[in-house]
Image: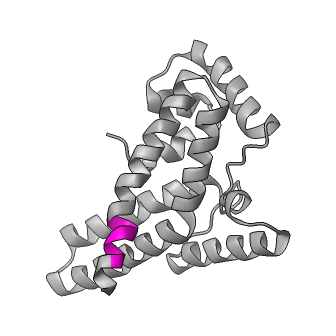
């Protein structure tokens, strides 16, 4: 099943944990690492949301600050990469979904409803403002720049996935306002 966790790992560097997650063999590591380097380090196809959605340094700083405010609201502090890294943003959406579903299973109805509502509101806002615009551009860039089976496949799956999520996360909000 494709979900945010899959995309979080897919946009991380193809190390041993990456290979294990996707059930790939060690002989696939070098070609994947070479394609990762070509796409995301040499070609200028950025794995950072601000690079896809901001036109100047001030907007990039504002974008990153806004992303950090979401993480801090949930008591999180990303480590090891920029906060607008596609891998970290996907992991954050996975975390919010987990928190929302866990609240439903473990809390009383009133408490669960409040926590679910908070998480869902945050999911929708983060998706609409940050994840969707950047992920869409990134996936389109990968599709146009790569013939590697893994990255081409993951970019196509990402487009399908975020378009389905958009129906719930963004389009539904339009109907609620009317």
Q: Is residue 99 visible?
A: no
What kind of secondary structure does the magenta stretch mostly adopt?
helix
- The reply, left or right, for residue 35 in relation to residue 170 is right
Image quadrant holding the N terminus, namely top left
In the rendered image, residue 71, in percent from the top left (x then y), is placed at 56, 72
Q: Position of residue 120 (x, y in %)?
A: 35, 74
Q: Is the residue 92 above or below the residue 142 in the image?
A: below
Instruction: State which quarter of the image contains the C terminus.
Output: bottom left
Instruction: Give the residue drawn at x 59%, y 12%.
Output: 27
x and y, in percent, of residue 162 in the image:
43, 53
Residue, far top = 27
Q: Can you say whether 149 is above or below 109 in the image?
A: above
Q: Residue furthest left?
A: 109
In this rendering, would 40 be left or right of 91? right
Give the magenta-colored segment's residue range: 168-174
Name the residue nearer the viewer: 165 or 13: 165
Residue 31, quarter of the rendered image: top right
Q: Residue at x 49, y 44 (%)?
A: 7
Question: In the drawing, does residue 40 fall left or right of residue 117?
Answer: right
In the image, residue 9 above or below residue 97? above
| Number of marks drawn | 0
Q: Quadrant of residue 124?
A: bottom left
Asked which colour scheme the image uses, the reply is: one colour
Asked whether 132 falls inside the magenta stretch, the response is no
The residue at the point 68 percent across, 63 percent down is 53
């Amino acid at each position: 099943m494709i979900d945010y966790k899959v995309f979080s790992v897919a946009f991380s560097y193809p190390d041993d944990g990456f290979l294990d997650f996707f059930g790939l063999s060690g002989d696939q590591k070098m070609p994947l690492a070479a394609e990762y380097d070509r796409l995301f380090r040499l070609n200028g196809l950025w794995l950072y949301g601000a690079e896809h959605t901001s036109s100047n340094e001030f907007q990039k700083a504002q974008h990153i600050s806004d992303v950090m405010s979401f993480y801090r609201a949930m008591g999180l502090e990303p480590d090891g990469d920029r906060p607008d890294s596609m891998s970290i943003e996907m992991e954050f959406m996975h975390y919010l979904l987990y928190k929302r579903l866990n609240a439903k299973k473990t809390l009383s109805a009133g408490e669960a409803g409040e926590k679910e509502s908070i998480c869902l509101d945050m999911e929708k806002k983060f998706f609409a403002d940050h994840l969707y615009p950047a992920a869409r551009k990134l996936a389109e860039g990968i599709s146009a720049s790569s013939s590697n089976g893994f990255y081409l496949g993951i970019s196509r799956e990402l487009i399908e996935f975020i378009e389905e999520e958009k129906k719930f996360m963004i389009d539904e909000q339009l109907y609620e306002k009317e």
